[in-house]
Image (cartoon, helix red, strand yellow):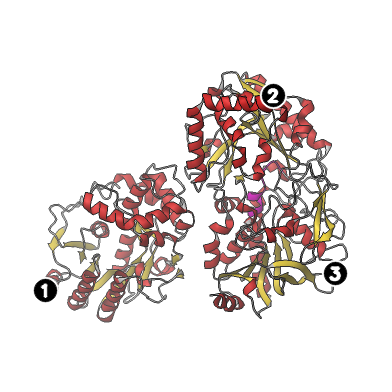
């Protein structure tokens, strides 16, 4: 049995990775999280081994990896957290296989069809730059396989399912016209978890793999499919003037939200730009070399209202 | 910025939208495929070829906005002005073409439209419905008309209402839909996508004035163009596609006669003939036996947000049995100008008609004979129904004016449950209905067009028979009565002349050069590298508005051209 430490095990992706490892005959997960978790929402029997660890702290991490054969790094956070986590992990990993969850953000402002050889511009902000630096830190000294998912959707996905569903229900998004022409580059969270397991056992040391379903819909297409799945149809065409208004209102709305804690959160202008951006992740390598099989969109959306892995988090 | 554009334009394979006025010294351009005309068809074709990574130069004679000086190139003569709108109306010489002003009604052709029908002379397409089926869904998406689903039972929500409660037609169906585009202006909607396509260049202010053939007259050697100042430049391309609409395409080909004296593709005097539109009008009164509550003549909204509407359609079987063309109809509010409808919102529209766009105003023309009494009647209607008028005004403001997906038309429930009938019928191909070169010329010396649109006795028969079948089905179903005067049919169907903006059949598709201009692949007979895209190639007009099918044909052409270029490169 391979003992696999999952860092960020209480996050959206981490939970699915722990569940997938639990189900695998060859692996035993150790769920590592920053905060102690009273009861990890997993219907696993026997219960999953848990460890409380600050994944940015070298000493704490060194203790946590004792007796562990491999590490899955699902740590999310601000740029400082990303930096410190990568440094700590690189220092303590030894010859253990690391599967590192990076992001399509590493490609920064690049446009068009991007495979893994595209330059890592990381030029769209501190987060993107930190993600690039983390990849480089890990590649330099560890046995790492890097996964670069696009937008991870699935029941419980805060960013790409829950938030979108809320905005659809509020009729603030829908058919965005040219504003939703960008490729969604979505990937189902189960496919990410499956890719992690494949990467743990692959011999592609130092390789990076884009993760996005082939022929992913554009954002307009994804919004319609999601709206159908949660009954928010008919969707509405959002006029360009309304999107401009959303952009202009983003800062006042954010302030109002913080003050009142009642008003709807703004749609960040960066997100509005992102939905129109002409970027398509080429995930051929993940298909061919890792052997990832992709969940069709209909199947990926089918279980939306059933929650994720029994944790009760309906979208 | 201008300099940058100019430099980039000279480089093959860099996506940009530029003006020919900024070409500078780079006056000999080249491309693998040159598309002339950036309307629905040209833009769809360019995007589809761009997806294949093919080097495309899309040229547009106009600029990015309406410009009267540019529009003047469309001026021409109409033999009978009562039967055809002026040639500068209902077509736009600018990026986006006529989609900048279209109504957005979409529907595919019916299977019977492709058939050679022995009761309609010159009918029959060289391709069948299967040839277009793979392309319609993408065409629908490009038109932003939602899913390619035109059946009421699958496209609408289960609680959608029938058109007329209890109607069960033998010859007329109500379960087929028309769907509506936003209406999408292709120039605005796809401008970013065109600019992002790495192998597509778009050049505005670039008017083709001549198609130059090689000495043998077997292929296009180059296109001669003028920028907005009239300075000449040229384009050489391996393939040329004209996507300039059913009138301008004819003009370009007829006017390019230095090698072939009768114009390009016109060895057998077919080019410009068989000019069709649709025969449309408003006639009669449908009295709903159970009142307006038993009728739903408005729009339904599909899941994807598109407006859909049921149509009364003459079944294919009835068309065969009665040997007529294809016809659809819709229930319509009573004639607006006649205040006896007693309906406030309609009277408000009548009184406020000065605010309605010019091209739509003709249909609001009043009965001058009614004079002051008519105006008083309208005013009384408005005063008596303030709530209905206000609700109507709010809807027009929010769902039409402010909305990007616009409520497609005026839908008002008539107070007395009496509806008029809007019909839209196929026009039969008639070689005497034609587009020719006139004697005057435009600023670049190109001959202007002269249009002689004609309808035929068969067209009157088609509409008359369809109305009779509808009246019989209404009667038989016991849902009311449809009254109309058969003697009025011809007058009503020609009241406004040819349905404006549908320019069909002038360069028809067929197997023989003796009776057609292009082959089944939309290639001009006898020319290796000249292709036509648009409704000009339709051999028959169907009942359907032509844009959706024109876009589908353009997407099919994109596949054909892609294959040819790849095969050409291989050998």
Q: What residue is shown at x 81% (from left), y 69% (from top)? A: B218
Q: What residue is shown at x 68% (from left), y 35% (from top)? A: B365
Residue B43 on image: x %, y %: 61, 60
Above-or-below relation of B379 to B3: above
Badge 1 and badge 2 both on one subunit:
no
Pointer 1: residues within 10 angstroms few (<14), some, or many (20+)? some
Residue A35 image-quadrant placement: bottom left
Locate the C terminus of chain B by quadrant: bottom right
Q: Observer-nearest residue: B62 or B465?
A: B62
Pointer 3: residues within 10 angstroms few (<14), some, or many (20+)? some
Pointer 2: residues within 10 angstroms few (<14), some, or many (20+)? some
Q: Which chain letter goes with mark 1?
A: A
Q: Which residue does the numbered mark 3 point to in the structure image?
A: B258
A310 on left or right of B527: left
Residue A143 on image: x %, y %: 27, 76
Q: Observer-nearest residue: B537 or B14?
A: B14
Above-or-below relation of A206 to A224: below
Q: Which residue does the numbered mark 1 point to in the structure image?
A: A59
Q: Which residue does the numbered mark 2 point to in the structure image?
A: B471
Mark 3 to mark 2 CA distance (whole Å): 55 Å
Mark 1 or 2: the one toward you: 2
Residue A196 image-quadrant placement: bottom left
Above-or-below relation of B439 to B387: below
- The stretch in magenta equals B542-551
Residue B159 on image: x %, y %: 47, 31
A246 on left or right of B208: left
Q: Is residue B90 visible?
A: yes
Q: Observer-nearest residue: B353 or B547?
A: B353
Mark 3 or 1: the one toward you: 3
Mark 1 to mark 2 CA distance (whole Å): 89 Å
């Amino acid at each position: 049995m391979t003992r696999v430490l999952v860092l960020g095990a209480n996050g959206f992706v981490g939970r699915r990775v722990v569940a997938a490892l639990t189900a695998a005959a060859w692996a035993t997960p150790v769920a590592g999280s920053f905060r102690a978790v009273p009861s990890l929402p997993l219907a696993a029997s026997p219960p999953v081994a848990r460890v409380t660890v600050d994944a940015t702290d070298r000493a704490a991490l060194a203790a946590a990896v004792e007796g562990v054969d491999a590490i899955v790094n699902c740590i999310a956070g601000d740029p400082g957290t990303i930096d410190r986590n990568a440094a700590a992990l690189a220092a303590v990993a030894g010859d253990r296989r690391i599967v590192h969850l990076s992001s399509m953000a590493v490609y920064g402002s690049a446009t068009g069809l991007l495979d893994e050889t595209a330059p890592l511009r990381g030029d769209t902000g501190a987060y993107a730059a930190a993600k690039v630096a983390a990849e480089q830190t890990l590649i330099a000294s560890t046995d790492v396989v890097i996964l670069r998912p696009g937008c991870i959707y699935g029941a419980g996905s805060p960013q790409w399912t829950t938030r979108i569903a809320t905005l659809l229900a509020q009729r603030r998004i829908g058919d965005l016209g040219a504003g939703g022409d960008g490729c969604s580059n979505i990937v189902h969270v189960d496919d990410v978890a499956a890719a992690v397991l494949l990467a743990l056992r692959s011999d592609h040391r130092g390789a990076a793999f884009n993760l996005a379903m082939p022929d992913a819909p554009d954002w307009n297409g994804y919004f319609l499919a999601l709206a159908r799945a949660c009954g928010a149809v008919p969707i509405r065409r959002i006029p360009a003037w309304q999107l401009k208004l959303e952009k202009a209102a983003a800062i006042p709305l954010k302030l109002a939200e913080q003050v009142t804690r009642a008003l709807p959160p703004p749609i960040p202008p960066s997100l509005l730009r992102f939905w129109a951006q002409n970027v398509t992740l080429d995930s051929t390598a993940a298909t061919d070399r890792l052997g990832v099989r992709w969940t069709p969109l209909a199947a990926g959306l089918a279980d939306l209202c059933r929650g994720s892995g029994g944790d009760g988090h309906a979208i | 910025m201008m300099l940058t554009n100019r430099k980039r334009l000279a480089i093959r394979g860099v996506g940009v939208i530029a003006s020919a006025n900024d070409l500078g010294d780079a006056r000999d351009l080249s491309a693998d495929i040159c598309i002339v005309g950036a309307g629905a068809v040209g833009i769809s074709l360019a995007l589809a070829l761009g997806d294949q990574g093919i080097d495309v130069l899309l040229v547009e004679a106009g600029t990015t906005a309406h410009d009267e000086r540019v529009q003047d190139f469309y001026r021409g003569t109409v033999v009978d002005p009562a039967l055809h709108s002026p040639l500068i109306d209902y077509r736009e010489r600018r990026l986006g073409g006529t989609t900048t002003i279209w109504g957005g009604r979409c529907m595919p052709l019916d299977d019977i439209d492709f058939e050679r029908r022995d009761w309609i002379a010159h009918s029959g397409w060289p391709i069948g419905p299967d040839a277009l089926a793979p392309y319609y869904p993408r065409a629908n998406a490009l038109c932003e008309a939602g899913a390619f689903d035109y059946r009421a039972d699958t496209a609408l929500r289960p609680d959608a209402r029938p058109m007329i409660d209890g109607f069960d037609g033998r010859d007329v169906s109500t379960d087929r839909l028309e769907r509506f585009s936003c209406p999408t202006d292709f120039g605005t909607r796809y401008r970013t996508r065109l600019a992002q396509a790495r192998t597509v260049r778009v050049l505005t202010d670039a008017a083709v004035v001549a198609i130059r053939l090689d000495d043998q007259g077997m292929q296009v050697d180059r296109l001669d163009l003028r920028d907005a100042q009239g300075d000449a430049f040229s384009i050489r391309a391996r393939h040329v596609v004209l996507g300039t609409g059913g009138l301008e395409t004819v003009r370009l080909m007829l006017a390019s006669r230095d090698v072939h004296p009768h114009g390009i593709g016109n060895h057998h005097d077919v080019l410009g003939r068989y000019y069709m539109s649709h025969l449309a009008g408003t006639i009669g009164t449908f009295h709903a036996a159970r009142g307006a509550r038993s009728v739903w003549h408005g729009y339904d909204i599909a899941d994807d947000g598109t407006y859909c509407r049921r149509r009364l359609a003459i079944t294919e079987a009835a068309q065969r049995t009665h040997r007529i063309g294809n016809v659809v109809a819709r229930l319509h509010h009573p004639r607006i100008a006649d205040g006896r409808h007693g309906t406030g919102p309609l009277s408000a529209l009548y009184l406020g008609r000065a605010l309605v766009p010019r091209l739509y105003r003709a249909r609001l023309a009043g009965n001058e004979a009614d004079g002051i009494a008519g105006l008083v009647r309208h005013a009384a209607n408005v005063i008596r129904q303030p709530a209905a008028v206000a609700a109507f005004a709010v809807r027009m403001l929010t769902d039409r004016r402010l909305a990007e997906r616009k409520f497609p038309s005026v839908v008002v429930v008539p107070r007395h449950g009496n509806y008029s009938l809007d019909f839209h019928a196929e026009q039969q191909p008639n070689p005497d209905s034609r587009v020719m070169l006139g004697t005057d010329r435009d600023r670049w010396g190109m001959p202007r067009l002269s249009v002689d649109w004609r309808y035929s006795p068969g067209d009157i028969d088609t509409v008359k028979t369809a109305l009779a079948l509808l009246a019989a089905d209404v009667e038989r179903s016991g849902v009311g009565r449809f009254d109309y005067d058969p003697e009025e049919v011809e007058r009503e169907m020609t009241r406004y002349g040819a349905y404006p903006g549908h320019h069909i059949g002038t360069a028809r598709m067929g197997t023989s050069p003796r009776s057609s201009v292009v082959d089944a692949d939309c290639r001009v007979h006898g020319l290796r590298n000249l292709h036509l895209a648009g409704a000009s190639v339709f051999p028959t007009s169907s009942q359907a508005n032509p844009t959706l099918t024109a876009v589908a044909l353009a997407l099919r052409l994109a596949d054909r051209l892609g294959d040819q270029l790849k095969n050409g490169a291989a050998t």
